[in-house]
């Protein structure tokens, strides 16, 4: 390869610090999860005055942290594999099933559906707290969630069209 194409191709490694930063962010989410779990346990053992709604909101918060962490794993592993360098995990017993056929389009669809899942948790938390929310807040959170759903459907449909037009 000539010098300029080689430099352009090597520039993909500039993304490495970004993925390392996402790994640090995931560590922060792990810390947040454990803080919330310890808080829940202390509420259940010390206060013993946790209502079912409070319990549900805290558990939904824990699920939200896990879903965001899953999203981070998809971005880190899938993005590295797609845009930086192959991880050569083909024979590794813990290789995620989806990684064997990941590409930019598949990654976009997976990210869009993960965002819908996260948005669903937030919307559920909002509806559980509906009496303390304004109608405007309820309406806008629902509209934003529906926008995520429509966007994900459009991304998935576009990816289907592109993959059928260019079979692998």
Image (spheres, rainbow, N blue to C red):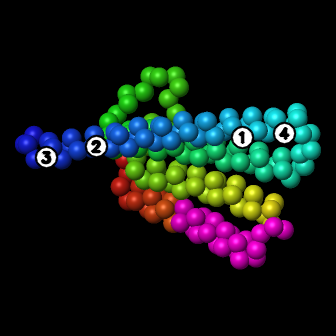
Image: 117 above or below 23: below
Which disc, if any, is residue 36?
A: 1
Mark 1 or mark 3: whose residue is earlier in sequence: 3
The residues bearing labels 2 and 3 have C-alpha atoms spaced at a distance of: 15 Å
Residue that label 3 marks: 5
Neighbor class of circle 4 (other Cα within 10 Å; few <14, some 14-19, many 20+) is some
The residues bearing labels 3 and 4 have C-alpha atoms spaced at a distance of: 59 Å
Q: Secondary structure at mark 2?
A: helix
Which disc, if any, is residue 43?
A: 4
Q: In the rendered structure, does residue 144 fall within the stretch colored magenta?
A: yes
Percent x, y for residue 48?
92, 39
Q: Nearer the viewer, mark 1 or mark 3?
A: 1
Q: What residue is shown at x 77% (from left), y 45% (from top)? A: 59
| Tag 1–tag 3 contact (CB < 8 Å) | no
Q: Nearer the viewer, mark 1 or mark 2?
A: 1
Q: Dominant secondary structure of the magenta stretch?
A: helix
Mark 4 or mark 1: whose residue is earlier in sequence: 1
| Tag 2–tag 4 contact (CB < 8 Å) | no
> Does residue 82 appear in this view?
no
Percent x, y for residue 36?
71, 40
* In the foreground, 50 or 79: 50
Q: Secondary structure at mark 1?
A: helix
- Determine which quarter of the picture holds residue 146: bottom right
Neighbor class of circle 2 (other Cα within 10 Å; few <14, some 14-19, many 20+) is few
Percent x, y for residue 103?
40, 46
The part of the chain drawn in magenta is 131-152
| Tag 4–tag 1 contact (CB < 8 Å) | no
Image: 68 above or below 96: below
Percent x, y for residue 4?
10, 47
């Amino acid at each position: 390869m000539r010098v300029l194409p080689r430099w352009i191709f090597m520039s993909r490694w500039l993304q490495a610090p970004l993925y390392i930063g996402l790994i640090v962010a995931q560590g922060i989410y792990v810390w947040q999860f454990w803080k919330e779990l310890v808080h829940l346990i202390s509420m259940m053992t010390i206060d013993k005055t946790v209502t079912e709604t409070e319990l549900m909101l805290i558990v939904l918060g824990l699920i939200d942290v896990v879903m965001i962490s899953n999203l981070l794993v998809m971005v880190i592993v899938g993005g590295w594999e797609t845009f930086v360098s192959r991880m050569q995990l083909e024979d590794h017993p813990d290789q995620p099933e989806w990684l064997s056929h990941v590409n930019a389009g598949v990654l976009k669809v997976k990210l869009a559906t993960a965002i819908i899942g996260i948005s669903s948790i937030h919307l559920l938390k909002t509806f559980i707290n509906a009496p303390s929310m304004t109608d405007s807040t309820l309406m806008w959170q629902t509209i934003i969630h529906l926008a995520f759903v429509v966007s994900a459907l459009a991304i998935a449909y576009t990816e289907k069209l592109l993959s059928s037009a260019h079979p692998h």
